[in-house]
Image: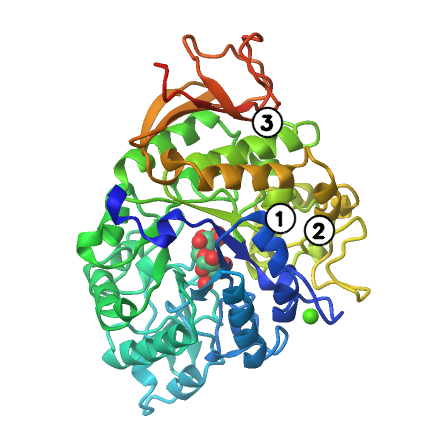
């Protein structure tokens, strides 16, 4: 493995949610010129690649995850010229661009779908039409079928996101053209949206479930593997690029079946098992976060999966400081640094989501009107129908809504996201004390810690390519070893707000510490303390 590492194994990827990153023209919506304006900021942070959530033409039912033209840019974000300029400016700075590839579904406003409503159209079979719906349910709750005239079409997400029919070879040809279009422009890969559910083997009724009835008919099917192999051999192999799959509901075996190099499908996948440890049944029913459960999942993935895509935040997940820290006011700064240490020292390619590098928090909206995400709005309606009281509905959303991660990035005390006087989604008032400008000046800030940690990682053989060995996983402390030929590191993380004893026998040189620790005289770890200890020359 060590010798086979490619650039994307060593890279750190920064995810941009364009709508909320930086607004260059004062309309309250982030845009491509805004990204160009901030490339130097990203370069200074030290990341190597940028994954852009969708910027394609879209009616924005699901903020761009509903595409109406794959080879055009959403006018709210700019033009194709802006996009070409972004690719060029990024290249000048040696930053790679990864595009979001959403090919499970299109928008219902895509010309293919509009045409396919006519049963006689040659586009009819681009989508999945039936005279009668089956019992499948959508990821956004409710039935997965909607009626148009006398027939029903399948949509695993919103009804404005009809699923493509991957049994139709013409769909494959269309998508190949789109891949070539973008790769020829010089982009370096794709993050492939819900890629493991694109192939529907049968349309029979599913086993009744609390969520996602029907999934056994489309989850990680043989047909999906065939598609991925073909896209790779016929298109992707011709370019220096990589793919990371967003793969819902996969276990480690299924992950390996998608990414093992011998199979020639994807290069890595985002698993969800570590995101599932703080809820029962579905993400809306949050339980107390127990670090040990997370440690167990991470140990399994680290040891069993060929190469991991490591992340703790993205545009669908609540903010990690609000989610995993007992008191995110008191411990936000040390806690964010501890989580950074975890994210950047696991084996695999780390992904950082915009705002994570300054410890941005959940939204704390007070009214339902402040929410923008279609999923949140749907769930709130559903909960109202079920007589959930208002305080409970608001509480559920405040913990689990995707809008928690979608507030504008906080550039300075006034916000600094836009020059206009409104933003498409309310800003977080805590911008006054959580923002990039302040943290650039403060040498103890989360941002500075990220910069230093990234530098350390980029120079560390063990972190870049070493193997992973679990050391201990207790209720509070997570520790593991990363070892390469010439370097051996022990990572020790207190994932609690308590002060547990440092595990016995730990010696070595402290090379990273979020408390400026230089020795082990204090035998207890501070709340959320994180240490990287060089044990190359000592036995731990
Ligand atoms: O957040 C979720 C719903 O509760 C996830 O299940 C999410 O829908 C799933 O991870 C798929 O996400 C991706 O595809 C969706 C899009 O809405 C998400 O933003 C995207 O990341 C449909 O394209
Ligand atoms: Ca704008």
Distance from label 3 to label 2 (Cα)?
A: 23 Å
Residue at 60 percent across and 42 percent down: it is: 399
Residue at 31 percent across and 27 percent down: it is: 469
Q: How many neighbours does mark 1 have within 10 angstroms: few (below 14), some (14-19), or many (20 or more)? A: many
* Image quarter (top left, top right, bottom left or bottom right) of the N terminus: top left
Q: Nearer the viewer, mark 1 or mark 3?
A: 3
| Residue 483 placement: quadrant | top left
Distance from label 1 to label 3 (Cα)?
A: 19 Å
Residue 37 lies left or right of residue 223; in this view the side is right
Ligand 2 is within 8 Å of the C-beta of the residue at disc 2: no
* Image quarter (top left, top right, bottom left or bottom right) of the C terminus: top left
* Residue 131 vs residue 108, the one in the foreground: 108
Q: In what element is the residue under mark 1? A: loop
- Please, is residue 442 above or below residue 507 in the view? below
Residue annotated with mark 2 = 410
Q: How many neighbours does mark 2 have within 10 angstroms: few (below 14), some (14-19), or many (20 or more)? A: many
Earlier residue among tags 1 and 3? 1
Q: Are marks 2 and 1 in contact (CB under 8 Å)?
A: yes
Distance from label 2 to label 1 (Cα)?
A: 7 Å
Q: Are marks 3 and 2 in contact (CB under 8 Å)?
A: no
Earlier residue among tags 2 and 1? 1
Residue 261 lies left or right of residue 279; in this view the side is left
Q: Which mark is residue 514?
A: 3
Residue annotated with mark 1 = 355
Kindly tell me whether residue 380 is visible in this rendering: no
Residue at 39 percent across and 78 percent down: it is: 181
| Residue 25 placement: quadrant | bottom right
Residue 101 rendering spot, x and y as whole percentages: 41, 67
Q: In what element is the residue under mark 2? A: loop
* Residue 100 vs residue 398, the one in the foreground: 100
């Amino acid at each position: 493995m060590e010798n086979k590492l490619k650039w994307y194994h060593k890279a750190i990827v920064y995810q941009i949610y364009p709508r909320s990153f930086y607004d260059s023209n004062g309309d309250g919506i982030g845009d491509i010129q805004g990204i160009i304006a901030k490339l130097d900021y990203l370069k200074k942070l030290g990341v190597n690649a940028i994954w852009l959530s969708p910027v394609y033409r879209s009616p924005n039912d699901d903020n761009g995850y509903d595409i109406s033209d794959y080879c055009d840019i959403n006018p709210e974000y700019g033009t194709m010229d802006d996009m070409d300029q972004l690719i060029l400016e990024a290249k000048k700075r040696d930053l790679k661009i990864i595009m979001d590839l959403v090919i499970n579904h299109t928008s219902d406003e895509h010309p293919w779908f509009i045409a396919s409503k006519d049963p006689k159209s040659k586009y009819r079979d681009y989508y999945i039409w039936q005279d009668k719906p089956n019992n499948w349910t959508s990821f956004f709750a409710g039935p997965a079928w909607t009626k148009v005239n006398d027939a029903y079409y399948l949509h695993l997400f919103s009804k404005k996101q009809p699923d493509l029919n991957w049994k139709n070879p013409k769909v494959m040809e269309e998508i190949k053209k789109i891949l070539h279009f973008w790769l020829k422009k010089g982009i370096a890969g794709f993050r492939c949206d819900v890629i493991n559910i694109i192939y529907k083997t049968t349309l029979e009724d599913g086993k009744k479930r609390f969520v996602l009835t029907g999934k056994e008919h489309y989850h990680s099917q043989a047909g999906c593997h065939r598609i991925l192999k073909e896209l790779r051999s016929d298109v992707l192999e011709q370019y220096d690029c990589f793919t990371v799959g967003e793969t819902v509901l996969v276990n480690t075996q299924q992950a390996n079946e998608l990414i093992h190099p011998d199979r020639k499908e994807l290069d890595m996948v985002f698993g969800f098992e570590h995101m599932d440890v703080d809820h029962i049944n579905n993400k809306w029913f949050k339980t107390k976060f127990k670090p040990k459960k997370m440690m167990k999942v991470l140990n399994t993935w680290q040891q069993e999966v060929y190469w991991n895509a490591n992340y703790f935040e993205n545009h669908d997940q609540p903010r990690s400081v609000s989610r995993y820290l007992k008191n995110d006011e008191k411990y936000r700064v040390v806690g964010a640094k501890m989580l950074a240490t975890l994210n950047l020292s696991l084996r695999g390619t780390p992904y950082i989501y915009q705002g994570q590098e300054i410890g941005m928090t959940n939204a704390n909206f007070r009214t339902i009107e402040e929410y923008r995400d279609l999923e949140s709005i749907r769930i709130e309606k559903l909960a109202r129908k079920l007589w959930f009281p208002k305080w409970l509905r608001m509480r559920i959303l405040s913990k689990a809504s995707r809008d928690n991660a979608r507030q504008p990035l906080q550039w300075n005390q006034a916000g600094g996201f836009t020059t206009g006087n409104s933003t498409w989604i309310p800003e977080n008032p805590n911008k006054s004390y959580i923002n990039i400008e302040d943290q650039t000046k403060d040498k103890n800030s989360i941002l500075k810690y990220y910069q230093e940690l990234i530098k350390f990682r980029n120079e560390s053989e063990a972190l870049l390519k070493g193997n992973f060995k679990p050391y201990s996983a207790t209720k509070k402390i997570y520790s593991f070893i990363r070892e390469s030929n010439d370097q051996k590191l022990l990572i020790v993380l207190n994932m609690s707000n308590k002060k547990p004893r440092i595990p016995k026998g730990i010696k070595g040189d402290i090379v990273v510490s979020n408390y400026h620790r230089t020795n082990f005289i204090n035998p207890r770890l501070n709340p959320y303390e994180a240490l990287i200890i060089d044990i190359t020359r000592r036995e731990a």
